[in-house]
Image (cartoon, rainbow, N blue to C red):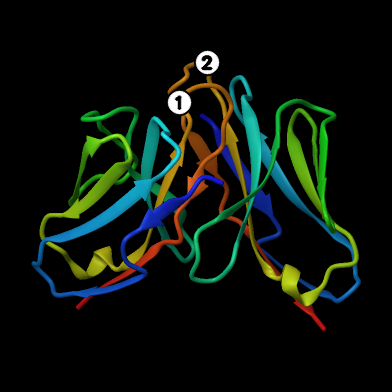
Amino acid sequence: DVKVTQSSRYLVKRTGEKVFLECVQDMDHENMFWYRQDPGLGLRLIYFSYDVKMKEKGDIPEGYSVSREKKERFSLILESASTNQTSMYLCASSQGTGSYGYTFGSGTRLTVV
Amino acid sequence: EDQVTQSPEALRLQEGESSSLNCSYTVSGLRGLFWYRQDPGKGPEFLFTLYSAGEEKEKERLKATLTKKESFLHITAPKPEDSATYLCAVRGGYSSASKIIFGSGTRLSIRP
């Protein structure tokens, strides 16, 4: 089974801190994605990557950046955390072409105080 | 614009009471329709992929069907452990880089 592992289940950070969320997948998938999920707003795409060192903005990239130096690892960076970035963050991966769905990690619940 | 709408937002059933969840979609060139289950505080877990109208998939008490405009997730004789949020998503377009569009989900609660 494909496994997508997010480094932390729960994080508490202070306003203004730089925050790194890490995601690793073990099935050589080309595509990786970062979403945030908030009650009433559903899943919103932050950034995605189709290949190493490639990144594209999703629907809500403001306040975030990403890094993909290796195929299996996709990092989400909050440059200066703010309280409105308190959310559940979900990483996903998929194969590159065709009609494949996504495999999700278990999520990171981030609280910014 | 590609769109996915799920109904109802929430559904409460008695154990053993069968029902259906609806997913209506608008997409150019459907490449796949996906159903996920999400438990509170966890990531979505893949259930089914459907590719063309008329296709059906089954897993235990769940059965997913697909038409050209909507998909149904039928739940037969549900148990309390089937309580979760069920997400529908579509992948469309003609590019291999096309993204998946998610619906907002249906919260299903099964009372013992």
Q: Quadrant of residue A13?
A: bottom left
What amino acid type should be assigned to the residue bearing mark 1?
Gly
Could you say where residue A35 lies in the image, as x and y percent from the top left? 38, 50
Q: Is A2 situated left or right of A89 in this image?
A: right
Q: Position of residue B39 (x, y in %)?
A: 58, 67
Give SS at disc 1. loop
Look at 86% across and 60% down and name the residue there: B19
Q: Amino acid at mark 2?
A: Tyr
Q: Please, is residue B38 above or below residue A35 in the view?
A: below
Image coordinates for residue B56, horizontal then vertical, percent? 83, 37
Q: Nearer the viewer, mark 1 or mark 2?
A: 1
Question: Within the image, what quadrant is residue B27 found in?
Answer: top right
Q: Between A107 and A38, which is closer to the camera in this rendering?
A: A107
**Res. B94 mark:** 2
Helix, strand or loop status at disc 2: loop
- Taking depth in this image into account, of B102 and B34 the one nearest to the observer is B34
Chain under numbered label 1: A
Residue at image x 12%, y 71%? Answer: A15
Number of numbered discs visible in the structure rendering:
2
Residue A61 at x, y percent in the picture: 25, 44
Subunit ID for the residue under disc 2: B
